[in-house]
């Protein structure tokens, strides 16, 4: 232990595809010789040994300290972590694998529209001599949910596949399952009741003790978090560049920053344009703004007589420091 970072990613399916695409967008391209190989490399991170596992196995191996770092679904982390306090969620919103854990009942149950209705139903069923049967693979999360909303009489039916078919086949009354769009539930004549039990997406997890014991792993994690944090922050920003005529740099700056909300993260960068056969007095203004303000900035530039407006997405947006890694470092130091 200590010479490398052991980093696990999902081995196949949409979570693998999302992980590979996200890491590549962060400059951390995964090199996997063929789909049957369960080891890979990240050239930009030579100290990392990348292994591929099932998402549930990733949670268990990181939680037990067999791996320092992994990517899995937040739903599995919350279901499987138990009392293993060394399991840390470093980033819980990587932007893919988005789904919700919901309660769904037959759509013929027109009188059941809330969690209170389910609690009342469980009492009625208990009085008739049997519990409310809930098919799910999320046993821990469902037990916590039932305790929280007052569903006292129920039985968990373990279901690892085709959970949505359980009510129709008669071996469960309702289900608790993960869904992205709800289409499969509707196709099986089910409706969602109440708010989601959990909103989940891909997350980055780590083992506290393993990171504390390995300086190499901590350094590799810092590199990854720097890139991931900057990439996630940049998703919401664009860079706008435009040419604006003016008597001086200061005059252009005053006119442009008259709209403070469009002046960028820390203000515009303004530079004189070297005249190429034409008249001088033109300045290039560059500003980084939230993507939703793109058209506002374009209209503002046009109102100032600007031209040559170019808009490009921001690939990375770094802060003065990596707040995510600083938070991780503090957790490790505080518990040392």
Image: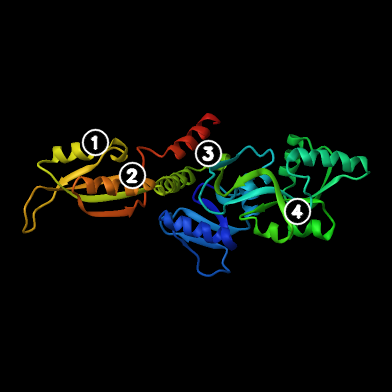
Find disc 4 in the rendering and name its residue.
107
Task: Say whether residue 94 is left or right of residue 258.
Answer: right
SS for callout 3 = helix
Find disc 3 in the rendering and name its residue.
212
Find disc 1 in the rendering and name its residue.
258
Q: Which residue is drawn at 9% across and 47% down?
A: 281
Distance of label 2 from label 3 (alpha carbons): 38 Å
Point out the image quarter for the C terminus.
top right
Earlier sequence position, callout 1 versus callout 2? 1
Distance of label 3 from label 1 (alpha carbons): 50 Å
Q: Which colour scheme is used?
A: rainbow
Distance of label 4 from label 1 (alpha carbons): 56 Å
SS for callout 2 = strand
Find disc 2 in the rendering and name its residue.
289
Earlier sequence position, callout 3 versus callout 4? 4
Residue 128 in view, yes or no? yes
Earlier sequence position, callout 4 versus callout 1? 4
Point out the frontmost of discs 2 and 3: 2
Q: Residue 188 carries which label?
A: none
Distance of label 2 from label 4 (alpha carbons): 46 Å
Locate residue 301, reporting x and y percent.
24, 47
Q: Which of 128 and 312 is in front in this view?
A: 128
Earlier sequence position, callout 2 versus callout 4? 4
Task: Say whether residue 238 is left or right of residue 300.
Answer: right
SS for callout 1 = loop
Locate residue 286, reporting x and y percent.
24, 47
């Amino acid at each position: 232990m200590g010479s490398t970072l052991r980093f696990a990613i999902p081995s196949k399916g949409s979570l693998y595809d999302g992980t590979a695409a996200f890491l590549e967008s962060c400059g951390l391209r995964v090199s996997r010789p063929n789909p049957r190989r369960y080891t890979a490399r990240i050239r930009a991170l030579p100290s990392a040994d990348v292994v591929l596992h099932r998402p549930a196995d990733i949670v268990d191996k990181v939680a037990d300290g067999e791996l320092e770092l992994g990517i899995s679904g937040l739903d599995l982390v919350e279901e499987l972590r138990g009392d293993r306090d060394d399991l840390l969620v470093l980033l819980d919103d990587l932007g893919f694998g988005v789904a919700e854990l919901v309660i769904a009942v037959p759509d013929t149950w027109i009188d059941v529209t809330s969690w209170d209705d389910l609690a009342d139903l469980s009492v009625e069923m208990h009085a008739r001599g049997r519990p409310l049967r809930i098919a799910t693979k999320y046993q821990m999360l469902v037990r916590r949910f039932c305790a929280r909303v007052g569903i006292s009489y129920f039985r968990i039916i373990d279901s690892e596949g085709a959970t949505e078919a359980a009510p129709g086949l008669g071996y469960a009354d309702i289900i608790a399952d993960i869904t992205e769009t709800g289409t499969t539930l509707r196709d099986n004549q089910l409706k969602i009741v109440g708010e989601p039990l959990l909103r989940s997406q891909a997350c980055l997890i780590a083992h506290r003790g393993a990171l504390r014991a390995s300086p190499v792993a901590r350094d590799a994690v810092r590199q990854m978090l720097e890139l991931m944090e900057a990439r996630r922050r940049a998703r919401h920003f664009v860079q706008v560049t435009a040419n604006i005529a003016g008597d001086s740099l200061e005059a252009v700056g005053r006119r442009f920053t008259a709209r403070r909300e469009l002046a960028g993260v820390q203000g515009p960068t303004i530079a004189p344009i070297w005249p190429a056969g034409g008249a001088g007095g033109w300045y290039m203004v560059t500003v980084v703004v939230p993507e939703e303000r793109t058209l506002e900035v374009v209209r503002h530039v046009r109102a100032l007589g600007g031209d040559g407006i170019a808009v490009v997405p921001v690939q990375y947006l770094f802060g003065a420091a990596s707040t995510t890694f600083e938070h991780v470092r503090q957790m490790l130091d505080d518990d040392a």
